[in-house]
Amino acid sequence: MPVKGFYQRRFAHEPQAERALLSSVGFTGAFAACRGITHAIKAGVGPFGNMSVGGRHLHHSTPGILGLIGIGFIWTQRAFTGDDRPPQWGSRITATAYGICSALTLDEFALWMDLSDDYWSPAGRKSIDAVAIFGGLTSIVAIVSTVVDDNDVMPSWLKKLGRFDIAHSPGPPVAPAVAAMAEDAQAPTIAQ
């Protein structure tokens, strides 16, 4: 299959680019699905209905927030951050889940500020739809373009953005970690 071969050549050995791509694809797909389902609920079309717990409406930002907290906890433990080779499935799953949970949370951004359900007002819908879909698609294009740029024609700033290359961004160098010394080892002297 050409797509699988392309993916294997371009992303399977670039964990940072792969995670960025999967997060963006998860975000864009989940946001589009979420909007489609909420519009279907509002129109009374299909098998969809509002979520509720004990008769109380449950906003879809709630599982999104809980998911982000869970993934953040996993990543703070340095698990599934792209170094889980082979086969990197934990990294792939958490990166995709991060994008999905971000979409669920940001889809109800209007509730963050006003705590009122203005989800269906024109102000609560149009700008968020446009920004999220545009942001998701442009990040997918940027990530894919940086990995596919065989002729090295893309500007370096776009490559850094597409790969989220913060390791090579300007700033002070980070000191290497110092290994723990044995009790009877002599402390190094520091020249001034």
Image: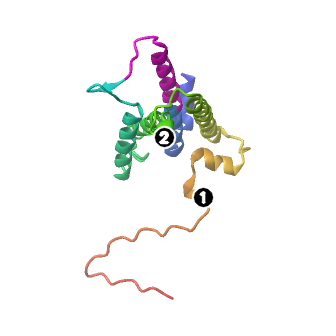
Which residue corresponds to the image point at 63% horizontal and 36% vertical from the top-left?
138
Picture residue at 62% right of the left edge, 50% below the top? 160
Q: Nearer the viewer, residue 54 or 14?
A: 54
In terms of secondary structure, where does tag 2 sit? Answer: helix
Mark on residue 169? 1
Percent position of residue 128, x then y: 57, 34
Find residue 171 and report its image quarter: bottom right
Magenta portion: prevailing SS class? helix
- Compared to residue 188, the image places residue 34 above or below, namely above
Residue interval drawn in magenta: 28-50
Numbered label tally: 2
The image quadrant that residue 96 belongs to is: top left
Q: Nearer the viewer, residue 124 or 179?
A: 124
Mark 1 is surrounded, within 10 Å at the Cα level, by few (under 14), some (14 to 19) or many (20 or more) other residues, namely few
Contact flag, marks 2 and 1 (Cβ < 8 Å): no
Q: Position of residue 118 (x, y in %)?
A: 50, 31
Kindly report which numbered mark, 2 or 1, lies closer to the viewer in this rendering: 2
Does the magenta-highlighted stretch encompass residue 98? no
**Which residue is under mark 2?**
114
Task: Give the class, few, some or many, for how many residues have Cα within 10 Å of label 2's Cα (few <14, many ≥20).
Answer: few
In this picture the colour scheme is rainbow
* Amino acid type, label 1: Ser
Q: SS of the residue at dot 1?
A: loop
For badge 2, the amino acid type reads Asp
The one nearer the camera, 133 or 165, is 133
Q: Left or right: 169 with respect to 106? A: right
Where residue 84 sits, quadrant-wise, is: top left
Give the spatial CA distance, label 2 vs label 1.
36 Å
